[in-house]
Image (cartoon, rainbow, N blue to C red):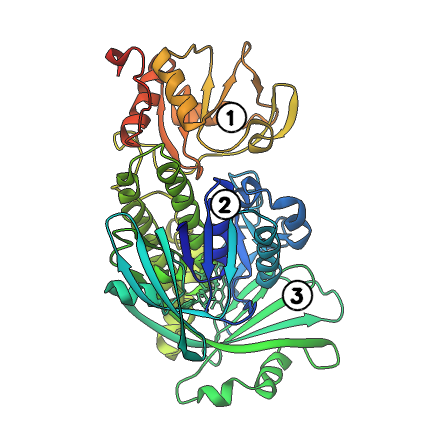
Amino acid sequence: MKDVVIIGAGPVGLFSALLLARCGLSVDVHERWPSFYPLPRACGVDHEIIRQFQGAGLMDELAPLLDPVIGPDKTYEFLDADLETILRIDWNRPGASGWAQVNQFYQPDFELLLRRRLEAMPGVTLHHGQELVSIDQHDHHVDLGFVETGNAGVRTAAQARYVIGADGARSTVRDLLGIRPIDLGFAYDWLVVDVVPHQERVWKPYVIQHCDPARPTTLVGSGPGRRRWEFMRLPGEAIEQLNTTQTAWDLLARWNLTPDNATLERHAVYTFRGSWADQWRSGRVLLAGDAAHLMPPFLGQGLCAGMRDAMALGWRLGAVLNGVAADSLLDSYGPERREHVVEIIRQAVDMGRLICMLDPAEVAERNRRMKAAMADPALALKPPPEPRLGYAGLYRITDTHAGTLSVQGRVRHNGNEGLFDDVAGTGWQLLVRGPWVPGAVSRSIIARIGAVVAQFGPHGDTVDTDDIYDAWFDRLGADAVLVRPDFYIFGTSPLGDVDALVHAAATMLALTIEAPLQDQATW
Ligand SMILES: Cc1cc2nc3c(=O)[nH]c(=O)nc-3n(C[C@H](O)[C@H](O)[C@H](O)COP(=O)(O)OP(=O)(O)OC[C@H]3O[C@@H](n4cnc5c(N)ncnc54)[C@H](O)[C@@H]3O)c2cc1C
């Protein structure tokens, strides 16, 4: 029996497998496609996700494949039909996680990298050409049934202690569990065209939403040397008529792209939707990625949300299956992730409603409103929400800063200089400003959860070389921050209460204690 079986070898399934294998678990991934079939859909991920990739040891190979969107020229702008700016989004800057706020890339390159890493790891097996058809849950395991893709007569079976359904928008896992998607009723078809221009060109603005009711269009980078165009299907236009190479070239001509100066790699029509599953856990089966949530791509957050799911599940399943925490730890996964992603889905849909607008009177009013908002920042469209975990999450609920994302800067730690995670380590992180001597119970808990402890200040082992952390402690009004393995803050405290903070984490984790801890009275 495997520790975890993952259904779906898309980016979320593959990244989940990598995280779980790094926890020492045995993982099988079952994929319906008979061979590797990556689709270039996502073309950007944010700073938080790059920090996740850094923690998973991918950056040595991934960094050259990224186009970090930094610099005054790399703006994201909404333009009206006459190419006049009606909204400028502030994203071309460094993000809080130590990486650019937005990083463009080519999804198939990333998936190939993940596959190569997984193939080299003990404990992980990828099974291709196997379509999940049944799930049978028991007290201590799950039985899964598969048919060979295209040959329903050939059946195979698998057993796992836990299952992750990362099987995409039309999730079989979700259907078999009888979980309902909640849909916001937003549905627009878009032709997505991937292009490699033959010569480097300066794209200004760097990313464009051309809000032209004659043909709403998105222009975006998709990794070094590549560009992506997305064209909305107009009312009365047949998908078959839109989804042709000739139509793609006809639409690209408006942007001075022709077969003489560019290669058209691929075109496909997608329906952009906003929906989420009303439940993310059923017994030993958990949903992740597009199986759990869908959003239009205008904020570039769909895959980011899936990667957050993988992280949130990775450390939880690692702790439960390695005997550190009880199974109840998995209960907080769905509630905290769902609330977080629903806020982003709603924003992406609101943005989509602005972009997909066709009625001339509504478009004129939108343009007027957005131009006014550009002059008066108080009227401006809200930027995407800073990630914050949902209410019923695993963090200290009474702490205003708990459930928000932590920061990463450069430090000198025990003589090594670099980004914090590279030199201090990942997993649970306890950052303390000032002298703190842990009590015996705290020491036991820290050892049990494998937390990294970094002490800033004159007598500490960590120097804040970029002046990031001191300002952060000040902003939080705290001298200690306990950060979860997915980089969200569990809680903060003054120097005198660090032990209580650590003890609170042990309680919420339902930590399984092998030997009685010393000094229980201080809990
Ligand atoms: C045009 C477009 C642009 C986008 N741009 C961005 C962006 O810039 N940034 C961003 O963050 N996100 C973006 N997204 C969203 C992002 O691409 C998706 O959220 C992400 O790819 C979903 O990954 P996944 O692994 O959850 O699902 P998928 O990639 O869909 O993988 C699911 C896998 O499960 C397999 N499967 C399905 N059913 C079964 C079964 N019964 N048995 C076995 N296997 C099964 C499928 O074959 C598939 O391989 C974009 C999406 C689109 C369409």
Residue on which disc 1 sits: 469
Residue on which disc 2 sits: 21
- What amino acid type is highlighted by mark number 3? Arg
Q: Classify 10 Å Cα crowding around label 3: few (below 14), some (14-19), many (20 and above).
A: many
- What amino acid type is highlighted by mark number 2? Ala
User: Which label number is shown at residue 261?
Assistant: none
Q: Position of residue 442 (x, y in %)?
A: 37, 17
Q: Position of residue 428 (x, y in %)?
A: 44, 30
Image height of 373 relative to 490, above or below: below
Circle 3 — which element?
A: loop
Q: Position of residue 348 (x, y in %)?
A: 39, 60
Front residue (pair 238, 178): 178
For label 3, being within 8 Å of ligand 1 is answered: no
| Tags 1 and 2 touching, CB below 8 Å | no
Identify the mark nearer the N-term, 1 or 3.
Answer: 3
Image height of 179 relative to 98, above or below: below
Residue on which disc 3 sits: 226
Circle 2 — which element?
A: helix
Judged by depth in the image, the label closer to the viewer, 2 or 3, is 2
Horizontal side, residue 33 vs residue 265: left or right: left
Q: Residue at x 49, y 79 (%)?
A: 215
Horizontal side, residue 211 vs residue 337: left or right: right
Horizontal side, residue 223 vs residue 286: left or right: right
The quarter of the picture where residue 318 lies is top left
For label 1, being within 8 Å of ligand 1 is answered: no
Q: Position of residue 130 (x, y in %)?
A: 45, 69
Image height of 261 relative to 276, above or below: below
Horizontal side, residue 410 vs residue 488: left or right: right
Judged by depth in the image, the label closer to the viewer, 1 or 2, is 2
